[in-house]
Structures are given as C-alpha cells and as structure tokens.
Image (cartoon, rainbow, N blue to C red):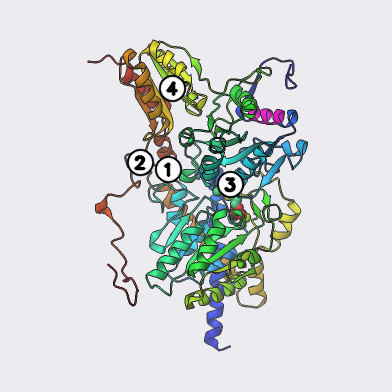
Amino acid sequence: MSAYDTGEGIRSMTYREAMHEALHEALANDDRVFIMGEDVADYGGTYAVTKGLHEEFGRDRVRNTPLSESGFVGAGIGAALGGLRPIVEIMTVNFSLLALDQLVNTAATLLHMSGGQLNVPLVVRMTTGAGRQLAAQHSHSLEGWFAHVPGLKVIAPATAEDARWMLPSALADPNPVIIFEHSGLYNDRGPVDPNTGPVDLDRAAVRRSGSDLTIIASAGMVSKALEAADQLDKSGVSADVIDLRSLRPLDIPTLAASVARTNRALVLDEGWRTGGLSAEIAATLAEVCFWSLDAPIARLAGVEVPIPYAKHLELAAVPQVDDIVAAAGNLVRPIE
Amino acid sequence: MSDQLFETARSLEHRLLADMIRIRVFEERCAELYGQSKIRGFLHLYIGEEAIATGVMSCLGPTDAVLATYREHGHALLRGVPAESIMSEMFGKSTGCSGGRGGSMHLFDESVRFFGGNAIVGGHLPLAVGLGLADQMLGRSDQVTVCFFGEGAMAEGEFHEALNLAALWNVPVLFCCENNRYAMGTSLQSSESQVDLALKAASYSIPAWSVDGMDVLEVHKATTKALTAIRAGGGPMFIEFQTYRFRAHSMFDPDLYRDSDEVEQWKKRDPIMTFGERLLDAGDVTSDDIDEMWAAARAETEAAVEVADAAPLESIDTLLEHVTLEASENSSPGPDTPFVDDDEVWP
Ligand SMILES: Cc1ncc(C[n+]2csc(CCOP(=O)(O)OP(=O)(O)O)c2C)c(N)n1
Ligand SMILES: [Mg+2]
C-alpha cells in the first residue's frame, strides 16, 4: 500500500495536486532526486505545482535557479551523468527554446555519441498550450518539435491519474524524458488511484470506445475530444477517443487497432498543422491502415498563426469542441 | 540662474512629475480593469518604478529607438503611444497598438520607434544591439537605442552575448537595467553571484554605473550624461537604476516571498510622493499644480478607457493576417540614408 493511500480508495484530485504528490513521492523515496527551476521554491512554481516542497525537503533539493534556461538544463544533464536524478522544471515550452541546444544537441545525443557509455536519466517538466490569453511568447504547443528528436522520450499526461503516475516511470527511465503539462489542465479534477504504481510510458490509452471513427488526441485536446464525442453520440455518431500519452515513441499498434475497427480517423493537435505531430500520425496511419480506411484521414490542428492575445482570436486559433464535432461530422457523412 | 534657465528647469520638473503621475494613474486603472476582466492574460505593473521610464524618456529624441519588457505600459505611454491605443490593446480590441494580438505584454508602435513589449526575458537585448548596429552602419550617428530590462535578465546568456557584441562593435546603445531586486519570487542575492550589477556590465569594457532609480532627477541627469557620450560616438553604456516594485510581479502572484516590512520601507521612497514633496518644499510647484496633474492624468486615462470600451473587436476573418507579408507589401523599401562607406563602392 502506498504512503499516500488514505484508506479512502480512489480519490478525486486536481491535475496540479496529482503532479505535486508525484513530486513529493519522488523526493521522499530517492535521495538522488532533486528539483530545480525558476521560482520552484518560495514562489511554488509558476503554476504552483512545487508549492511547499522546499519546506519539507530543503532548498538544496528544491533548488531555485536564476533565469538561465540553457544553464540549468545543461546542469541537469551533468547532474544526471554524475549520478543524481534531476527533475528540471521549465516554466513554459516557449522558454525551453533557450535550452533547446542542451536538450537536442546534448541530452538526446550523449548516449549515441559515446557509443552507449553515457546515458542521461533526466526528467524535464514544462507547461504547454494556449487558453489563458498569454499571447505569442507564452502559449505555443511545441511538443511536436521534441517528438521529432531521437534520443528523447516525450510524454503528455492528460489526466490527473497520469499526472500522478507517469512521473515515477519517467524517473525510472534511463533516458531523458520530457513531460508536457498543458496549463489548462491544472485545475481539472479526476480520479486518482493511490496504488497504481509505475505505468507504461509508451502506451496510448483508449479513453472512450466507439465504432464510427477514431479521434486521436493528446494533452489539452483529450478533454475537448471527449466532450465532442459526447455531443456526437447524441447525433448517433460513436467515437473512439484515444489519448496518445506518449508523443515519442508513438503507440502505433493501439492507434492502428482502433482505426482498423472504425475505418475513420480524425487526428487532433493543438500545435500548428504544417510539419506537426498530426502530420506524422496521419502519414503513419495511411501507411499501416490504408486498406481499412473508408475516408481520407482528417486532421484538425492549430491555425498557422502565432497565438493572439484577444480572447476570440485565441479561441479561433486552436481547435475547439465545436470544430471537432464538425470535423468528425464531415468524416462520417456518407459520400454523395 | 537666469530667469529663462530657471523657467526651463521648472518646466522640466513639472513634466517629470506629471509624467510619473500619468503612468501611476493609468496603471492603477489597469489593475481595476483586470479585476473586472476587461484586461486579461498577464498584467505586470510598474507601480513604484515610474521614475526610471520617466527620467530616461525625458532625454530621448524622436528618432531614438526604445525596447522594453512586458512591464512596459509606462514606457509606451511616455514614448508617445497614445493612451487609448495602449488601453485598446489591453482590451484586445482592433484599435489597439498591436491590433489586439499582443495585449499588455506586447505593446508596439513603430511610428514612435517603440519596439515592444518583449516577454522572453533577455530576448530583446540582442535586438537592441542590432538596432544600434543599423544606426551605426547607416551613418545615423545621432540616434541611440535604449533598452530596458530587469535585473533578472542579467543571468541569461543573451545578456552576456549582447553586451559583448555591443562593446566589440561599439554600437550606440544605452542599456537600462531596472533593478527592482526581484525576478518574480527570486531575490537579487539568489539570482546573481555578483550583486554589483554595474561591475558585472563593466567587465565587458562598457562604462557602467549605478543610480538611484527612485529619484527622477537623478535618472534624468544620468541618462543625459550617457546619451551625450553615446551620441558623440562613445559606444554602449550601462546604467543600473535601483528601484522596487510596489505590487506583485503580475496579477497571478500572491507575493509571498518578501517581507511586507520591506515593501513598506520602499513605499516610503515612492518616487512620485518624494519628488512632489521636494518640489513643494522648494516652492517650485503648488499643491494646486499637483492636483491638476492628477486630474489631467485621470482624464487621460478615463478617455482611454472609454475609447477602448467602445472599440470594435478585430474580425475573426483577420486571424491569418500579419503572419507573413506578400513581397508586394514590402514596407521597408530600403534605407533613406545611403550606406556610408568612404572608399568602397557598394555593389
Ligand atoms: C526566458 C524566460 N524565462 C522565464 C520567463 C518567466 N518570467 C517572466 S518575468 C520573470 C522575472 C523577470 O525578472 P526581471 O528581469 O528582474 O524583471 P522584473 O519582472 O522584475 O521587471 C520571469 C522569470 C520569461 N518570461 N522568459
Ligand atoms: Mg526584477
């Protein structure tokens, strides 16, 4: 039984609380684990995920850094090489671009460059996504870029349960793992099982079963897909909703099995369409499911514009529930 | 002092006080409007720090360039971006200075050479070097680029790269560090191994010094001195303005990381209050004058709010605008000042 089992069985937690508890457990269970990032201590993290941890575990293990993204991500890589298990927090994916060099040129390559000698057991957490009117330097969904890079593992927990249980698996992984947390999810509640334990990092999850089409989503798109699926149900269209969970590697067998059954696929992506993850998924499904498709694979992705500030423009720039319903409707419409 | 000089000094003092008040009133109204959800996203207030933008801006000419951070309402206002255009931007309206795309953190107005509104900490310092380089290479020798940033930016690699380039190339840039002692919840001591920021900048062979940023006249004097030297070809300079933000980092910040005593101590040095009292004591201003300044600032702000409230939203049909330009829309047909090169013929 886990130390966090209050005896009440499955609890309702926010995504934020679930991630906080996972971090707490990581610090409590393994002395090698430490957290570092901008304002993770007194301030509690930009999204209050690490709040209070420094009081219990001290400022060495919940370590504030200056504004130096490249520096502290690089230091995280070094610390991992030196035998620690760093969890680095970057405030948002937009700021991670200052550390892209360390992540892509170093963390992702060391194992290979060293002929298998040096692995980097580093966990990097960052937020992603639009929805809070933070405009074009704080709102992008760039996780697809990281999913492009061999040597990295990229995960995106979309539920409180996954926020709770993907972290221990990420820490146990010998590779650099990047965790994307959609900033719109932190206040969302969901059931969390206190005893789940480590989970598979590279498996997609079928969040809802249906027979007419497969909607493939990740991160902030999952709950929108589920809402759309409920609406579609009322008009007699039943959808499988798959939560990718892992963006690299992609769990193609799970996606293909669903599409082979529903014969239609709609791929959602909050990120931009061109060269995005949705393109990769659609192309791969076209390769492996071509003969079972009843319609062209459809994509619904972010509009190709930096995220605007004004609410109505921001809403129009990323897929919304109504857009998903409409796209799904087009896909299942009998061909005239 | 001759009568005329005396009058000039007095009118400068009046203007400095009035301008600080304009920023204060504008931003206090912004905070209210945030509470009413008229303004959304992040909102970073400059309250307490007004003497810096006011003192520096008072020294600039129309062809100088200005870059600032996301805490830039005051800088935009004093640079001459109309209050209603700033307020409309924060309301996300089409009449905003950035067409509703930028919001509070991304105010831009090319017509007054106000280059933002930058919210990647440190990201605009290299831009300032480039603007300075353009002035230098195009022979616009009397123009200066002024770059405002927080002390937090000095830990970023881009600060170091920018200062090194600026010094190497001797570009006409004034780096204005607004040291308010915190970068979000991180204090200066926990962010900088060397808290003498001028010393740090000086290590790049850039003249650098520290000034009381709560004293608008000191800011004005230091900036005048720096700009005179830069315009004479002296290359980049760095001034640390010591200041304090009276409000939380942004409207999302519960402000739990600093002592309320500390905040109260600094509030005693409120740049508007202290300067107003000094002028009153010296008889350079009457309390009626000061009342009038507040009233004028309120009128300006209220007019801006009215305009912003009534302004239309941008049509959704324009969502894809301003991403790339068509070649035919090229807005910069080339330098109006020819490239200055004595010997070589430009191909
Ligand atoms: C590269 C980058 N990292 C982190 C942030 C988040 N952030 C925004 S403002 C800020 C503090 C900056 O402090 P400082 O430079 O001192 O300016 P101040 O806010 O005090 O005016 C931080 C950490 C950011 N915007 N950009
Ligand atoms: Mg600061």
User: At label 4, which amino acid type do we have?
Assistant: Ile
Q: Main secondary structure of the magenta part?
A: helix
Mark 1 or 4, nearer chain start: 4
Tell me, yes or no, whether dots 2 and 1 are on the same chain.
Answer: no
The residue that mark 2 highlights is: B319
Q: Position of residue A38 (x, y in %)?
A: 63, 45
Q: Is residue B42 above or below residue A279?
A: below
Q: Amino acid at mark 1?
A: Pro
Provide the chain ID for the residue under circle 2. B
Alpha carbon separation for disc pair 4 and 3: 32 Å
Residue at 56%, 83% (x, y): give it. B6
Q: Residues within 10 Å of mark 1 (few under 14, many from 20)?
A: many
Question: Which of A66 and A171 lies nearest the eye of the viewer?
Answer: A171
- Residue A308: numbered disc: 1
Alpha carbon distance from label 1 to label 4: 26 Å
- Point out which mark residue A69 bears: 3
- Same chain check for tags 1 and 4: yes
Dot 3 or dot 1: first in sequence order is: 3
Q: Where is residue A119, by image quadrant?
A: top right
Foreground disc of the pair 1, 4? 4
User: What secondary structure is marked by label 3?
Assistant: helix
Question: Looking at this rendering, what residue extends furthest in the left direction?
Answer: A336
Q: Are marks 4 and 3 on the same chain?
A: yes
Residue B260 counted in the magenta span: no
Image marks 2 and 1: residues in contact by CB distance under 8 Å: yes
Q: Nearer the viewer, mark 4 or mark 3?
A: 3
A42 lies left or right of B66: right
How dense is the environment of label 3, judged by Cα within 10 Å: few (below 14), some, or many (20 and up)?
many
